[in-house]
Amino acid sequence: MPTDCISFRDTAYVSKLICDYVEKRPELQSLYHRFPTLENFKAQLEAKQSEFSSDKRGVLVAALIEQYTELKPPELTTQAIQSLGDENTFTVTTGHQLNLLGGPLYFLYKIISTINLAKELKNKYPKNKFVPIFWMATEDHDFEEINHFNFQNKRFQWTQETSGSVGALSTSELSEFMEVFSSVLGNSSQALELKALVKKAYLGHSNLASATRYFVHALFGFEGLVIIDGNDAALKRLFIPQITSELTNQQAFTSVSETNQQLTAIDVAYKIQVNPRELNLFYLKENLRERIVKKDATYSVLNTDIEWGLAAILEEVKSHPERFSPNVIMRPLYQETVLPNLCYIGGGGELAYWLQLKSYFEAEYIQFPILLHRNSVLLISEKQHQKLEKLKISVSDLFQDKQALIQSQIKKISTLPIDFSSQKEQLKQQFEHLYTIASQTDKSFKGAVSAQEKKQIKGLDALEKRLLKAEKKAHKDYIDRLEALHLELFPNGGLQERITNFSEFYLEHGDAFIEQLKSELAPLNQKFHVLTL
């Protein structure tokens, strides 16, 4: 079992919206269809089965076989792909950008959550098959988001002039980058394995999409994970009705705008993750991915001379659907249109925008999936765990702001009473008596009493701060060790899983690292896991 589990709310790193969703706040019920419990998947699979046709299954299987041609998958992967043609087979899906080496650690947690949920569903519903899916975001064009990773507090970054979708990027210029990274890994058995993986993935494939497919398959293909590229003409053809609807009705803008108003009405503290555009499509060709906009009766592609009337653009959709790329609002609808999917697994930011989409799905008559927050994890070494014990810090203490953590710990270990709360309370009680007297005399006296109370409370605050400062100086060694440990576990004050690359832990533990994650992470346990390696 995990070393410890902490509620998302207690970590202070998860948004209020996602905390409320995980805790099933009643007002949010209208924004999702079914909550992620094993029991709820029965109704979900029955609904998806009736919606997802055998024709769609045939197109999906054929597209995946074609996508895997270069990789030559093992029998297990081939069987998983072929099983998608069966009406009793369903998918559990996660998605990710094409970050080099996966980017931050949560890349692993997404995939492992997906694999483990598919296994749990198979145990619960043995008559059905469940295929874990990794959706590669090959059509994205934000190179700056995917061109780097952090290893041992150093940023490794790929610099290149780019345009168009990142999946099509040539890997020919990555040899020097990978050579620099490999040079810092050393020559341990795990280092040699990692070097070989990186070399085969990124230098043995012509573009970033193929490299990422190989990389993910090498790590998880033996688990039956199927990797899909949505930038596929056959799959896009299944999406023609929804593309046409977007161009003619702008349904996404209407539906999502209304949901955004609903979210704000539920709680002003909820952050609107994405705002829809009038048209939520890009035009995609070689070295080009630009937004489609509409002005009067003319559709055009930004920063180009390309334009159409309505009839012409609908003919373009019919002839070349692969040239129409959904943005963040429409991509979920595309995914659920081409997959017999039951559940989407993502991080807090992703689920926040999925919660904006249910009414849009309903308007397009596509089954809305169950939404599950991926496993979140803090990894602690045995040595770091021992330091925690010596410093007398609990795991939950770690999630405080660093300065708040230091202050609370100094108050715990100090032999002096640094916290003047009781004195302040006594002072307030004394002034309550003075307020009673003031109410029976001149009103100006009440103002004088209030001013004096504030002055004395402020004085106690100042004394408390001076005493705390003195105690920090007296316990400087303790604070230094505490700050150093906090920095190790929360790089730059952020979550480890959002900053550190998996290679840092693979280098030390090898495949055993991934095996431990798979054995200890429970996808339906919607808490923050703390694991000791």
Image (cartoon, rainbow, N blue to C red):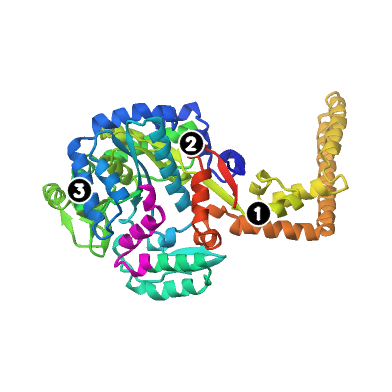
Q: Is residue 473 left or right of residue 256?
A: right
Q: Which residues are magenta?
A: 200-224
Q: CA distance from mark 2 to mark 1?
A: 26 Å
Q: CA distance from mark 3 to mark 2?
A: 32 Å
Task: Name the spot of residue 343 as percent of width and height, x first.
Answer: 37, 38
Give the mark count.
3
Q: Is residue 211 magenta?
A: yes
Where residue 445 is drawn, which disc sits there? none
* Quarter occupied by the N terminus: top right
Q: Is residue 451 left or right of residue 508?
A: right
Q: Earlier in the sequence, mark 3 or mark 1?
A: 3
In this figure, which residue is indicated by the disc labeled 1?
382
- The amino acid type, in three-letter code, at marker 3 is Ala
In this figure, which residue is indicated by the disc labeled 2?
524
Foreground of the two, 454 or 292: 292
Label 3 close to label 2 by CB (< 8 Å): no
Q: Is residue 477 magenta?
A: no
